[in-house]
Amino acid sequence: VQLQAGGGLVPAGGSRRLSCAASGRTFSSYVVGWFRQAPGKERDFVAAISGADVSLIMSDSGKGRFTISRDNAKNTVYLQMNSLKPEDTAVYSCAVAYRALPLSRYINYVHYDYWGQGTQVTVSS
């Protein structure tokens, strides 16, 4: 089970850090991804990070603004979001994947096994 924190109301241009902490099972060896879903839209990939070698992939919308990182000692993955825009408004969810696939496959949410409860991020203009 993943626990998420960090959502809220942010002014445009502001920053927010989301966290995803695992309880009950360590996920330091597994891929963790972030997705977001705005009202009336499909779930979109944001970023993912591998376990062992800490490789990462980032969506085009997040490049240059978002950073994904992990602290395996704390069993936590972070999504640092800077220069936020109103179009970043969405429910952000983290997920962990227990199967071994090429990292590029994890842009598809179907490859994830467990999901956090989601946290709302609202960026005001």
Image (cartoon, rainbow, N blue to C red):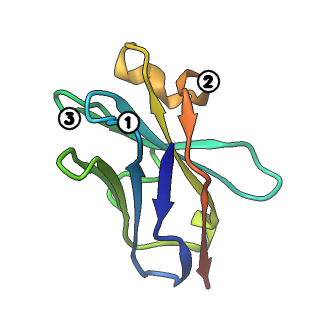
Provide the residue designation for mark 2.
Answer: 110
The numbered dot on residue 25 is 1
Q: Secondary structure at mark 2?
A: helix
Q: Secondary structure at mark 1?
A: loop
Q: Position of residue 100 (x, y in %)?
A: 37, 13
- The residue lying at 36 percent from left, 51 percent from top is 63
Amino acid type, label 2? Val
Question: Which quadrant: the C terminus?
Answer: bottom right
- The residue lying at 26 percent from left, 35 percent from top is 28
Q: Position of residue 95 (x, y in %)?
A: 50, 39
Q: Earlier in the sequence, mark 3 or mark 1?
A: 1
Provide the residue designation for mark 3.
Answer: 54
Circle 1 crowding by C-alpha within 10 Å: few under 14, some 14–19, many from 20? few
In this picture, residue 89 sits left or right of residue 73: right
Of badges 1 and 2, the one in the foreground is 1
Q: CA distance from mark 2 to mark 3?
A: 21 Å
Circle 2 crowding by C-alpha within 10 Å: few under 14, some 14–19, many from 20? few
Q: Secondary structure at mark 3?
A: loop
